[in-house]
Amino acid sequence: MNVEELLEKYAAGIRDFTGADLSEANLSGVKLNGINLSQANLSVINFSGANLSEANLSHAKLNVARLSGANLSGAILNNSSMNVANLIRADFSRAQLRGASLIRAELIRAELSRADLSAANLTGADLREAKLRQANLSRANLSEATLRGGSLTGVNLEMANLNTADMCRTDLSGANLREAELRQARLNHANLSGADLSGANLRWADLSGANLSGADLSGAKLSGATLMGTDLSHANLTNSSLVHANLTQARLIKAEWVGADLTGATLTGAKLYATARFGLKTEGMTCEWVDLSSIGDRSIIQKFNTEDVKEFFNQTPPTIRIIVDTILEHEANFALAGVYYQISREYQYLKQPPDIEISQRRTIFIFRLDSDAALLPTAYMAILPFKDATSTQQSIHKVVEMIMSQDISHLELKTPHRVKQLHALIEQAKNQSQNSQEMKKHLEIATKLSFFQSPTQMILTNSSGQPLTIHDHRHFGKKLTNSFHSFGTFFDDPSSDSAAPVFPALNIVIDFLKSCHYEG
């Protein structure tokens, strides 16, 4: 079939040209929207500027074809072959390209937004400045492809092969890259904010200067990766592998990375405000200094020698232990879940429910925190459901008063700034506990149960493993013959001697504070 016959039949209303042979034909600028050229031989054809919107080109051969500026929006090109084709500025928006072969195709500035390219082969393709917003490229092969400067916001690249791909300055914000292969990929200065890279293979990838803020890199493989100056603030790096990675001056403010392997990594100049230092593998790590300022402006610098690094990055998680001198019952457990849920809605540091250990006569609630600074204010909130709340809170206030009234300038923390900050956090917790009507409702339910009237101990343990008993009921561990006084409300000031607190000694408090690590 020649070009004249095709155009004559198309003008007559015929649309089905399945299996036609139009190789090397010149159809530039023609309007063939809705045409069916499935299984056709269209190799080396010239479709430049043609309108092929909604066309069916599935299983068609378009190798070395010219489709620059062509309109293929909504077209069906599943399992088609467009190897080495010229597709510059072509419009493939909403097109179906499942399983298509586009090896070394030129797609510079092409429009592929919302296109389905799942399992497509784009090996060595040139997609510079292409638009692939919300496109589906799951399991696609983009190895050695160039996506430099492209717009791929919200793209689906789950399990895609992007090994050695060039994605410099590419916008991949909100992209799905779960379990993608990105070995030796070039992602320097790329925008990956909010992207899902969980389980991705980024070994030896270049991510220098990239924006990975809020990204999920849990379980990702980043061994040997370059992350110099990379923004990883609020990122999830839990259980990731960063062996021999270069994190020089990386921004890790409030990042989650418990379980990360930093063996042999370089961390000099990293910004680590409010970032956990426990649960990490740090053998052979290089770190001359870190920035602990809240905004990463180098106003708080901490320098290290080799031994200092080991101590700094191998702390234990700060914990609060509430030990109740009785066994947890189902009814109390249900009430407690409701109370802590309401507290967590008001109070940001109580992110997760406590671990619970129950022995033959006692119940232990263990709260694991991200920082030493959160210990006292979180303890103020965590004790709320119990009759011992008032006396425990009095003890917390007393600790702050003790350190405010004493000369503790010799402590390795910025006083009085730290103490004022701590006092403000406790006052904030106090206000939150008193102002939430919904919280009060749940607390009133708890007060009617005998479990919450039992004697308690509260032990704080900071990130250096130093304990501080903040409250120890005088009847704790003793079998009582008389019942406790009625509970009242959680913010009452009971006059019974059972509520009278015994405050920790000043020297114990100071030892505890000395071994705390405060930031900001």
Image (cartoon, helix red, strand yellow):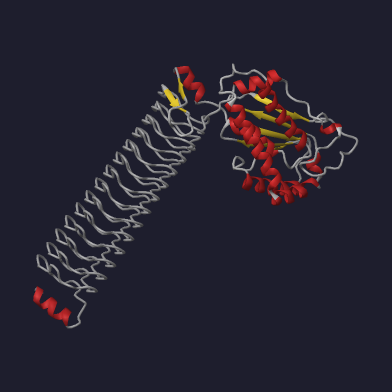
- Which image quadrant for residue 18? bottom left
Residue at the spot 64% in from the left edge and 17% down from the top edge? 407
Residue at the spot 16% in from the left edge and 65% down from the top edge? 49
Q: Where does the N terminus fall, quadrant-wise? A: bottom left
Q: How many marks?
A: 0
Question: Is 185 on the left-hand or right-hand side of 475?
Answer: left
Question: Is 302 on the left-hand or right-hand side of 135?
Answer: right
List x then y, in percent, for residue 58.
Answer: 25, 67
Question: Is 1 on the left-hand or right-hand side of 261?
Answer: left
Tell me if I can see residue 17 in this picture.
Answer: yes
Which residue is nearer to you in this view: 278 or 302?
302
List x then y, in percent, for residue 133.
Answer: 33, 56
Residue at the right extreme?
A: 482
List x then y, in percent, for residue 507.
Answer: 69, 18
Residue at the spot 77% in from the left edge and 42% down from the top edge? 490
Question: Does 169 appear above or below 114?
Answer: above
List x then y, in percent, for residue 483.
Answer: 88, 39
- Which image quadrant for residue 4? bottom left
Which residue is nearer to you in this view: 429 or 498?
429
- Which image quadrant for residue 422? top right
Tell me if I can see residue 355 in this picture.
Answer: no
Which residue is nearer to you in this view: 249 or 22?
249
Question: Is 437 on the left-hand or right-hand side of 175?
Answer: right
